[in-house]
Each structure stands twice: as C-alpha cells, then as structure tokens.
Amino acid sequence: MGQASEIGGGILSKRIDDRTMILFFGPQHPSSGHMRIIVKLDGDIIVESDPDLGYVHRTMEKLSESKEWIKNSVLFERLAILDAGNVTQAYIIALEKLLGIEVPPRALYLRTILSEINRISSHLYGMGIFAIMIGSSTGYMWFFGDREIMVQLAERITGSRLTHSYHIPGGVRRDVSPAFFEELERGLNYIERRLKDYEVMFVNNPIIRSRLENVGVLSKERAIELGVTGPNLRASGVSYDVRVEEPYGAYSFVDFEVPVYREGDALARTFQRFDEIRQSISILRQLMKSIPEGPVLNEKYLKLFTSKMKDVLNAERRVKLPSLFANLRPPPGRSYGRVEEGRGEIFFYIESTGDPRPYRVRVVTPSFRNSILFKYLPVGERLADLPAIYGSIDYFPPEADR
Amino acid sequence: MGGKYVEKSVSTRNLSLLSKARNHLKAIMLGAKLFIRPIRITYRYPIVKEIPQEGYRGFIVLDDQKCIGCSLCARICPASAMKMFQPQEKKLRPAINYERCVFCGYCVDICPENALKHARTHDVVFESGESMLYIGEKFTVDPDTQLLTGNVRMYRVKVDDKRGLIYEPIR
C-alpha cells in the first residue's frame, strides 16, 4: 500500500502500483450522500467497490425501546423525511395489528392519498439528486422545484410539510376539506404537464441517454439473489410490489398498473420512476373521486371523546387524541407491517410484552436492502459511471443507517 | 380492483434519427418558451413572506385561563420538549423548549381543555439557547401578532395548473 495522498479537489486516494489505485468517493453531500464508496481502480475501470455506510446511524431501533408506542411514530418518520407518510404507516399498521383495531374507510383513503403524494415527491427528490450527480443542473432544479407542489399538498392534509405525524392507531389525525381536492387536481394536472417537459429536456436528452444506457446493468437473477427491492427490482424484470402482493390502505379499491422493465440498467430505472409517477397520479385521481364520507377514527376511540373534543372534530376536522394514547398498552404479542415506500418495501417487526414501551422494534428499510448494490453493480464500469449508478439506485443514507 | 403488473415495451428506448431530431427541436422550443415565461417556484424570502395555510403546525401558544395543569401534554411529548413547572402559589403549567420541539402537535391534540393551539409562525430567530425556553408569560404570547410587523410583504401560496405555485399578495 502506498501513501495516502491528496489529488486535485481534495480527493483522497492511495496509489498501489502504476496501474492500480484506491479512491475514496465521498462522504459528501449531494454527490455521494452521507456515505462513501471506496473504489479500487485499474486505469479508470472499477475492479473493486466497497461501500462504507453508517455515517448517519442514530440507533433508532434501540431508541424506540425507551419511548412509548405513540411517540415512536414521530421517531420513525425521521428515517426518511421525504417519505414520512409511508414510513409511519408501516409502523402504525403493525401496531394496529397488535391492538386489533380496524381503520374506517375514509381514513384508509386519506392514508393512501398521503402515501401517493409522498411517492411522487420521493421520486422527484430521487431524480433531482440523480440529475445533479450526472451533471444536469436543469433536471435538478426542475425536479426539486416541482417537488414543492407535492410538499405543499401534503402540508394541506397534515399541517406539516415533511414530518407529517399523520397516522395514529385506528385512523388519521386530520380530515381534509373539499377545497383540498380541487387543489390536488390542479397540482396533479401541473405534474402531468411537467412530465412531458421532463421527457423532452431530461429523459430524451442525448447526453443523459448515453450516460445511462447499458450502465450498471442488474440482471433479473442477480436482483433476486441480492434481495434488492422497490423500483430497482421492478426495473430488472421482477414483478413484485407490496401494494399488489399484500394490499393495505385503499389500494384494493383502485385500479392501477405497476410498470415492470426488463433491461435493468440505469435508463430502465429512470423510466421506471417516471412511469410510477404517472401511475400515482392516476391512483390519486381515482381516490379523489371515490373517497367515502364518514369518521376518520375508529368508533372505539371516538366513544372516548368528550364534548369539547367533539366540538373541535366537527369545527376544524381535527382529531383530538384521547388521553389513552399517552399510555397505549398493546397486548403481548408480535406483529409486522409492510408498506411499499417510494424506494421499495419497508418492513416493521414489533414485539410487545404488554408494557407501555415496545420490547423490540426491527426495521428493514428499502435503502438498506438496496445498499448491497454498491458492492456489485459498479464493478467493471468506468469511474465516471459511478455517479450515474449511484443516482439511479435512489439510495437514501439516513434511511439505510437508521 | 387492485394493482396488476404491466411489462413495459422498449419502444421509447431506441430512438430513430428522425425522432432524435424532433426531440432536439422540442427541447429548443421548450427552452425558448421558458426563457420568455419562466416557471418560478421560489420567492425572495426575508422580504417576501409566505403565510402558511389554516391549520399549519407552527409555534405553540398556551391559554393560561383554560389550562388545568393535567400534564398530559408533557407526557405525550415525543421529544421531551414540554415539561411541567409550578409557578409560585399556582397550579402546574407547561413550558416548552424549542431546542427540542419537533412540531408534531401531539400536545395540542391531546389537551382536553383546548388550552394549547398552534400559531402559524414557524421561523423565529433565537440569539441564545436560553431564549428558546418558553416559560410562564412568554408561552402565552401568540407569535402571529408579530408576523405582520416590519417591512415585509405577505403572500399566500396557491397550487396552479400551469405555473405550479402562485403567490397571491394578501398585504
């Protein structure tokens, strides 16, 4: 091993012999995110790639054992801030199974509306980071700017831009006003128009095409072997989506398609995400038309409401929490919750001993499962393709590190 | 009802020379269109201010008359930002530390007497860590009353079909 030295731009590298060197790619935001990839190069061909994760590890699973059940939902949404609705939904689904509580239909619809808004915003975020990694600053500005519309819409439902804390056992915290659906329709029309613009300026751009085509090819067999999840799995030709396999929320009440691509390269993953945004728009339109009237919280909890709490619910469409929520004690047992997040399947396993705090919470996040790709996908590619591969995976470090 | 998988064709993948030329032309046209009438999502923040929607979860205000000192807000706070204090010869009252607060609004929602409410202000600058502790009198002041002071223009955001977001002046 040679001396570690700095080459231009403060990049750390180690020279091994005349042909080979080790390069430290990252950790810096936003090109490699909160992680680094240690690559061994022969010329500019990557011969070995070693992802170095854990820079934003926050001991979430252990921390959750010291907090009451309801407080953990606020903790876990910090796994993936841009997709908070989906993350907390998975946790709350698991908790509801333990408590044995049903969710009224209107609350299911509202949850799914938030999920799909989050999915669009998560995909736009991912594409934005992807665009700046491969040097398309137009794409970056456009995707990030247009994501703001989805963030605003989520704010109108939940009262908060990113950390929604929207789901509670047995329902949701707020109902929406009819005026919201008009705004949602306008927002969806805008995103739909812009998707055509993205196609013209980003997807069909010859430079983008040549940088993505046949780069980082993940075959179907390899994807299954490595346990990859989400859009990356589907872009490699595997038909798997939790929304279809184990429908939750209101997904069994709407018709939707899950696109599957066969090629498995960075371009296929890009197409995959754009198609999923199109499907999300269609799902949202269907939900908007068929949303039923009714309560947004389970009757069992509504019975505990005092007259003052009912006044707030009727006047502001805001659910007051019964004091029971501060001291929730699910019966002893184990359960799980699965949700298809923007980046893949998120899985919660929870274990209760009847205490006000969980005995064990295990989180398997999509980014964690996809992070294995950094070890195998870049090998044999050129160094200049590494950002394209990284970006196309849509990896979100805080989610993987937990 | 429910989802189904759909194999997508690769037709969009290999572009012919003609469609490549057409795409080039489209991109130039789009660029020209946006050059003349750009879509602007941002606004000039300190001079222009956005008023959040009704029901926004901003700073928390205490109504001292309504509070019964039941401590539920302090118990449900996920970040331990809210604590109970006992002023002299008075009942327990909550105090909030904005260094810890995550604005989840659980305290507001669990309050049985509606003594806590959200203001719409969310951007306050603090000079020191101690000033982030809102206790006693300070906790009962609605920061929204200071929202309109100074040389600031207020806007409300609306979602629009064509422009994405439009900012409507309200003052």
Image (cartoon, coloured by chain):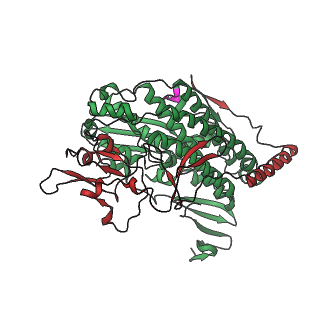
Tell me, yes or no, if residue A373 can be seen here. Answer: yes
Please state the horizontal and vertical placement of residue B34, each as a whole percent of the image: 73, 52
**Drawn colour of chain A?**
green
Q: Is residue A248 found inside the magenta-colored segment of the image?
A: yes
Query: A83 above or below B83?
Result: above
The residue under the point 45% across, 36% down is: A338
Question: Outermost residue, right direction?
Answer: B18
Tell me, yes or no, if residue A248 can be seen here. Answer: no
Please state the horizontal and vertical placement of residue A356, each as a whole percent of the image: 25, 41
- Toward the viewer: A356 or B94? B94
The residue under the point 35% across, 39% down is: A350
The chain displayed red equals B
State the image quarter where residue A32 is shown: bottom right
- Toward the viewer: A299 or A63? A299
State the image quarter where residue A158 is shown: top left
Q: Is residue B5 found inside the magenta-colored segment of the image?
A: no
Please state the horizontal and vertical placement of residue A129, each as a whole percent of the image: 60, 54
Please state the horizontal and vertical placement of residue A38, each as a whole percent of the image: 56, 63
Query: B78 above or below B151?
Result: above
- Toward the viewer: A2 or B50? B50
Q: Quadrant of the N terminus of chain B?
A: top right
The residue under the point 35% across, 68% down is: B128
Residue A350 lies left or right of residue A48; in this view the side is left
Q: Magenta region: which residues?
A: A245-251
State the image quarter where residue A97 is shown: top left
